[in-house]
Image (tube, rainbow, N blue to C red):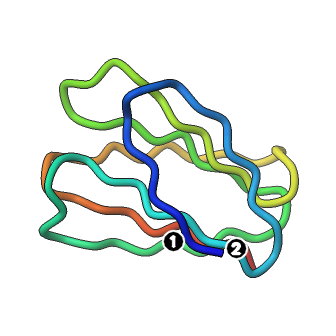
């Protein structure tokens, strides 16, 4: 499964093994990729947008923070 999320609303997204999601901040020009292990999660924000998307891999135990600038796309995969 692969889907795209934007920063219109605050969201909590739980991925299962093999699933991925692309988070887009503006018009995507640069793509970054992050692979999460079960229990890891990301808190992602987009420049000048007061919304937050949290993406977890099966559960939420260990977290990191990622800030996207306009023109960035982040592809998050659950391994």
Residue 42: mark: none
Residue 34: mark: 1
Q: Specify whether 8 is left or right of 27.
A: right
Q: Measured along the vertical axis of the image, is residue 44 above or below residue 22?
A: above
1 or 69: nearer the viewer = 1
Q: Mark 2: which secondary structure? A: loop
Q: Mark 1: which secondary structure? A: strand
**Residue found 82% across the figure and 67% down from its top:** 16
Q: Measured along the vertical axis of the image, is residue 46 above or below residue 15?
A: above
Locate the C terminus by quadrant.
Answer: bottom right
Q: Specify whether 3 is left or right of 18.
A: left
Q: Specify whether 76 is left or right of 48.
A: right
Q: Specify whether 31 is left or right of 65.
A: left
* Residue, disc 2: 19
Q: CA distance from mark 2 to mark 1?
A: 12 Å
Q: Quadrant of residue 57?
A: bottom right
Locate the N terminus by quadrant.
Answer: bottom right
Give residue 25's position: percent from left, percent from top. Answer: 25, 47
Q: Quadrant of residue 19?
A: bottom right
47 or 63: nearer the viewer = 47
Count of numbered circles in the view: 2
**Residue found 71% across the figure and 72% down from its top:** 78
Of tags 2 and 1, which is closer to the observer?
Answer: 2
């Amino acid at each position: 499964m692969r889907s795209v999320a934007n920063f219109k609303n605050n969201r909590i997204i739980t991925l299962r093994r093999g699933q991925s999601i692309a988070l887009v901040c503006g018009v995507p020009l640069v793509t970054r990729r992050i692979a999460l292990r079960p229990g890891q999660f990301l808190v992602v924000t987009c420049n000048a947008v007061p919304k937050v998307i949290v993406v977890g891999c099966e559960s939420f135990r260990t977290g990191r923070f990622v800030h996207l600038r306009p023109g960035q796309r982040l592809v998050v995969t659950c391994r």
